[in-house]
Amino acid sequence: MEYALLQAVFLPLLLSPVAYIIGRKLGPTPAMWFTFGLLLYTTVLVILAALSGTTEEHYPWTEQFGEFGFLLDGLASPFAIIIYVLSTILALYSKPYMIHRFHEQFEEEQHEITSTTSGHSEVVESSSLSNYVNAKSGLYFALYLVFAMGMLGTVLATNLIEFYVFFEIMLIPGFFLVALWGAGPRRKIGLMFLFWTHAGAVVLLLGFLMIGLTVGSFDFADIDESKIPHDILLLSAIAISIGLGVKLAVFMFHIWLPWVHGSAPTPISALLSPAMIGIGAYGLFRLIVEFLPNTFAELSIWFHIWGLVTMIYGGAMALMQDDIKRLLAYSSISQMGYILFGIGSMSALGLSGAEMMYVTHALGKGILFMMAGIIIVKVGTRNISQLGGLAGKMPITAVCAMIGALTIMGVPPTSGFMGEWTLFFGALETAIEEGSTVRAVTFGLGLVATALTMSYMLWMLKRVFFGKLPEHLEKVKEGSWYMTAPMMVLAGFTIVLGIYPDIFFNQIIPYMNGVLGV
């Protein structure tokens, strides 16, 4: 289809005001269905473009920056598909969760009003609550659409400045979604998210400028490593790695992520963790591995070690959490460590496994964050110590959560097994070929990190869904179909992908072989 990628990126942006108006005038249900339908259409466009092979679109832009374009190839396809599949599914999930959150905030605001009027309570009409929910839902779905298009635009960009623009666009709706509807001190946490990720983006831009001004062009097609002096290459690669490391929330640059995931509305947590932070890995694949291969060869062992430290740190911290969303946040840090570990393997299979880990993490963690949201809505707490025995009350949620946890742990027949198997196979292959003691040790320690992953996942499942049901949970019911059906779709997808991994490997492995010249 002509202009398929252009439509996929810009229709959500252009029609976001329509979602706002529909929500404000008609309420959350029509706004949700409009958002879902629009994202479903654009998701189909992306999938059809991916099935037709490498797709490129180029459009004239300013002479200052070069050409504006979109590229969907073996690297970008899995990222693009997962981003929009998750965005589409979570649009449905958003309706009951966000209505619950709007009601909570309305009550909080009414309490503040009554407490400042000399103790005289005010009678709140149901129409004022309805108007409040309508206004908030319109704004939520408008921001949601912009957030989704920012992620897709970053993955499809063909120009350094274009990449940076979309990279920054993600931050704006992300900040408002956290600051307006997050839990706890949401405005402070929203600012933390904005400052950390914007600081990373500025460092990333410095790396882009060093490359673009030296080469004389910002277009991806014009980047030639041989034309860039070695000292500039190294500095720009380090700057790009730090900027993307902040987005990945790897060790040392992870501080913001547990706070933001803990505070953000759960549908947004389920997009931030599985989809958005992994875009940092896409940037490393595209900007370092592909465009600067010799520099990547120098830095690969450091990526490998950095990934290992992140895996172990994130897993250890997850074991210490009582808040279910913070546990999942530290789990995401650990999973990003797996991806960085695979990138540093300098092996086509290791790199392929790292990209598959993005896909499997998105599926598994998307399920688990949705599970956490159902518990928050139906139980009213997110403290693991106050839960237990919920499998009998929430059978669908429990089964889906088990599949999501098995995916994160890398247990067959889920997709997580194929991602971890390929990643560690590639890491071991490089260690043997190079005869590297350091790589052999990191491989062994990486296997230890998988034991940590299994520990905190099984510990969480046991305390949430099994054991004796506390008395205060006797009347708990299963979540609505708006919440459970999206979980079931992702659970089915991760099993299908675990059995037929070539759905993505047929694109990923040839691309990685080409990048490494295998």
Image: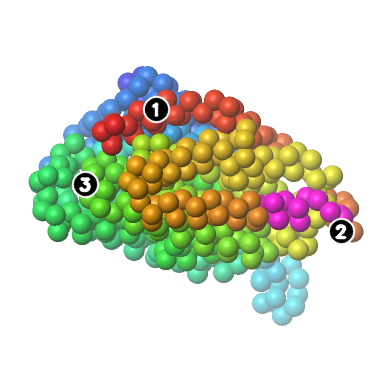
Q: Amino acid at mark 1?
A: Gln
Q: Nearer the viewer, residue 338 or 9?
A: 338
In the displayed structure, 105 sits above or below 74; it is: below
Q: Name the amino acid, label 3.
A: Asn
Q: Position of residue 232 (x, y in %)?
A: 15, 57
- In this rendered view, identify the residue nearer to me: 344 or 42: 344
Disc 1: CA contacts within 10 A as few (<14), some (14-19) or many (>=20): many
- The residue wearing badge 1 is 507
Q: Is residue 392 above or below residue 315?
A: above
Task: Write the start and end of the magenta stretch as one range.
Answer: 457-470
Q: Is residue 464 magenta?
A: yes
* Residue 294, numbered label: 3
Up/down of 441 relative to 148, above or below: below
Rendered residue at 47%/66% (across/down):
255
Q: Quadrant of residue 252?
A: bottom left
Sequence order check, earlier mark of 2 and 3: 3
Query: Residue 203 lies in what quarter of the image?
Result: bottom left
Q: Nearer the viewer, mark 3 or mark 1?
A: 3
The reply to whether dot 2 and dot 1 touch (C-beta < 8 Å) is no
Q: Is residue 10 visible?
A: no
In-image side of 31 versus 234 (left or right): right
Which secondary structure, mark 2? loop
Residue 324: in sight, yes or no?
yes
The secondary element bearing badge 3 is classed as: helix
Q: Is residue 476 left or right of residue 517?
A: right
